[in-house]
Image (spheres, coloured by chain):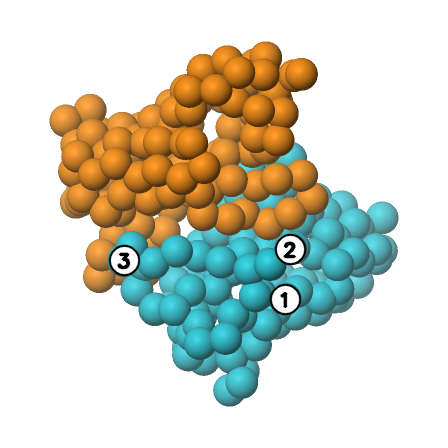
Chain colours: A cyan, B orange
Amino acid sequence: DSGVTQTPKHLITATGQRVTLRCSPRSGDLSVYWYQQSLDQGLQFLIQYYNGEERAKGNILERFSAQQFPDLHSELNLSSLELGDSALYFCASSVGGLADSYEQYFGPGTRLTVT
Amino acid sequence: GDSVTQMEGPVTLSEEAFLTINCTYTATGYPSLFWYVQYPGEGLQLLLKATKADDKGSNKGFEATYRKETTSFHLEKGSVQVSDSAVYFCALSFSGTYKYIFGTGTRLKVLA
């Protein structure tokens, strides 16, 4: 158990809909990262937050947004969903804001299926 | 730009065979290097890491040496087990930045 929790574990929804994925980082970790893992594109970095502020942005679509709340949990919002958004979404946390040599701790993921 | 390149999988081996999974990187500075493992149905977890040239990371019988001259960090294990079947990701990070880059992953299947 990494200490990172993600809910829900599975999500099935229709095209055009909006969903929210939730992540609670490991106790003491201030950084949260979001990744998308699909069969054909591997692990794609989406966005990083540190102590409530956005710190780095990867290949995140404009239809997607995220935030980190004062209690450090984070939410990833996916809107106008398309079939191609079906994937595993992972949250990871680390103690620092800068990458340095810090290990990232991954949650178990949320499997999103868009029908 | 900075990147990580891993050998394509899947890699299929018999139990007790020797494993090598190649990882090379392109970087403008001196990154820290990592191997993560993802077992079926789970998230990634750190397997080992090395933070400077010639460092060797090791864990659970796996080893990787940070080779600056060849910009490589190949993962090796002398005798694989069925339980090692997983996807292995090479990654790098840069001190003082927010940059953390993962490779595409290499699937390993070990047959009994």
Name the residue that disc number 2 marks. Answer: A108
Chain under label 2? Answer: A
Residue identifier under label 1: A5
Which element type, helix, strand or loop, lies under badge 2? loop
Q: Residues under labels 2 and 1: Cα distance?
A: 7 Å
Q: Which of marks 3 and 1 is nearer the N terminus?
A: 1
Q: Are marks 3 and 1 on the same chain?
A: yes
Quadrant in the picture for residue A79: bottom right
- Spatial distance from mark 3 to mark 2, Cα to Cα? 24 Å
Q: In this view, does A91 lie above or below B88?
A: below
Is the residue A55 above or below the residue B109 in the image? Answer: below
- Give the residue at x 51% y 87%: A70
A9 sits left or right of B1 in the view: right
Rendered view: A100 above or below B107: below
Q: How many labels does the image show?
A: 3
Q: Earlier in the sequence, mark 2 or mark 1?
A: 1
- Identify the chain of the residue marked 3, using the numbered disc in the image: A
Q: Is residue B27 left or right of residue A76?
A: left
- In the image, is A87 to the left or to the right of A94? right
Query: What type is the residue that disc 3 sits on?
Result: Asp
Mark 3 packing: few (<14 Cα in 10 Å), some, or many (20+)? some
Q: Do discs 2 and 1 share a chain? A: yes
In the rendered structure, the residue with mark 1 lies on which chain? A
Q: Is mark 3 on a helix, strand or loop?
A: loop
- Tag 2: residue type? Pro
Q: Name the residue under label 3.
A: A100
Q: In this view, does B4 lie to the left or right of A9?
A: left
Task: For the C terminus of chain B, give its image quadrant.
Answer: top right
Q: Tag 1, which secondary structure?
A: strand
Mark 2 and mark 1 in contact? Answer it, CB < 8 Å. Answer: yes
Quadrant for residue A96, please give it: bottom left
